[in-house]
Amino acid sequence: MELQVLFSGVPYTGTLPQGEALLVTQDSRRACPGAVFVCARGMTTDGHDHARKALEAGAVCIVTERPLGLPGEVQVASGRKAYAQLCQNFFGRPAEKLRLVAVTGTNGKTTVTTLIKQTLEQAGCTFAVMEASSQALDQLRLWGLTFEVGVFTNLTQDHLDYHKTFENYFAAKKSLFSQVKHMVVNLDDSYGRRLLDEVRGPERITFSAGDDAADYTARNIRLSASGVKFEMVGRGFIQRIDFPMPGDYSVHNALAAAAAAIALGIPARDAAAALSASRGVRGRCEVLYHGAFTILCDYAHTGDAIEKVLAGVAPFVEGRLVVLYGCAGERDAKKRPLMSEAVVKYADFAVLTSDNPRKEDPCAIIKDAEPVLAASGKPYIVEVERRTAVNRALDMLRPGDVLALCGKGHEDYQVIDGVTLYLDEHRIVREWLERKGLDKA
């Protein structure tokens, strides 16, 4: 692509070189002949420090936020904004051919995004539905996009290792709603209500598990180990929903997906039917086995997420609720005791293990989480190696027990000492069931 075309609509100063752009990148290691290298300051490194290296590798243009005096250099006010716009131009501005939907919040993003996708597939529509993480929003990776619908699920403590303060975290989430036409917001969440107070412009659509002030409300909620049933009450309609994921938080997720689909023009009847026909979501309160005992797998990796999962499951456990969990390394250490507090509140037996320790000592991570378990007086074991921990938890199951595997969910890997290793709890459970002759049950 000609550089003049690539920079269309991107404000810059300096003289744009002549030539073709074959690549747009912020990673100097990917720089090559024909590359456009965009400098931006990160948390630990500054792209400006690597600009000369990119030039030496053959970059045809260097985009900077301050003058470096390099050949082929142009300056912009924000490297991140320029990068987003250049990438859109490079790929022919595909967002302009799509109706975009974004889901943000601490918990429920993947579930709600998947449910919206399934609902739109059932209705025969074509959209682009994505999760909008706080880091992506803060780093302006979605800059310049306009979303038909933006969904806010909830906000609880997470990612403070990156954002440093909860206010920064909220601000990152809030920034999405300056780019949306319709905002779908959880009225039961205090930060959802704050969002409604502070954001002006988009059409406001609210949902609630019981507040009649919301546009969409759940009535006659019936919870079970296999899912939730309720009536969705909206503007002039009542639709029954039989949703195959347990937990009262599943009511919020289903309502969020339905509200978004309706905002996109899907009839309420079709949205409700699609949710009732849903296949569920891999790794989100997913039932891996249900027989004499039950095995669940969930991505819950914060105290709030674990609490939501266990609170939804606990009332239907006939035997013991066994919970396996671990805490992530090189992430907010304050979350670790909060995760243990959620576990001891509901679990009859806990298995404390590793999640993704990354380059942090797994034993040091466990030391942060274990005191709450020890003080609770509830039985527990510590097993650092996660595969072994899962098998130990499986071996202790008795009739009526429920085992909740928390933390990995859809992931099929573990990061230890900076190395990514294959670890799929779905496969571990499947192989254990085969050894026990339960795979046909």
Image (tube, rainbow, N blue to C red):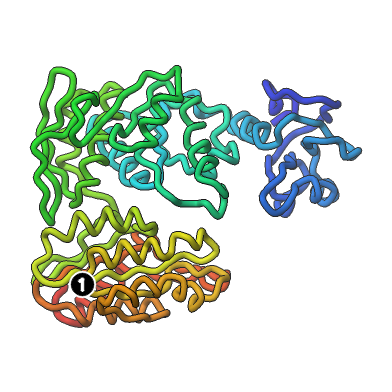
Residue that protrudes farthest toward the front in the picture? 375
Q: Secondary structure at mark 1?
A: loop
Location of residue 289 by image quarter: bottom left
Q: Position of residue 409 (x, y in %)?
A: 34, 60
Q: Position of residue 377 (x, y in %)?
A: 27, 77
Query: Is residue 101 found left or right of 13 in the rendered image?
Result: left
Q: Residue at 39% of width from left, 36% of height from top?
A: 191
In the rendered view, would you say 104 is above or below 367?
A: above
Q: Residue at 10% of width from left, 69% of height from top?
A: 291
Q: Is residue 271 visible?
A: no
Badge 1 local density, few (<14 within 10 Å), some, or many (20+)? some
- Please name the residue that numbered disc 1 is placed on: 348
Quarter of the image with the C terminus is: bottom left
Picture mark count = 1
Viewer-proximal residue among 260 and 51: 260
Q: Residue at 72% of width from left, 36% of height from top?
A: 21
Query: Is residue 378 found left or right of 145 in the rendered image?
Result: left
Q: Position of residue 61 (x, y in %)?
A: 80, 37
In the rendered view, would you say 357 is above or below 64?
A: below
Location of residue 432 by image quarter: bottom left
Viewer-proximal residue among 396 and 414: 396
Viewer-proximal residue among 105 and 307: 307
In the rendered view, would you say 4 is above or below 221?
A: above
Q: Is residue 89 visible?
A: yes
Location of residue 68 by image quarter: top right
Viewer-proximal residue among 47 and 305: 305
Q: Check disc 1 and give the amino acid type.
A: Asp
Q: Residue at 44% of width from left, 74% of height from top?
A: 366
Quarter of the image with the N terminus is: top right
Q: Position of residue 78 (x, y in %)?
A: 70, 33
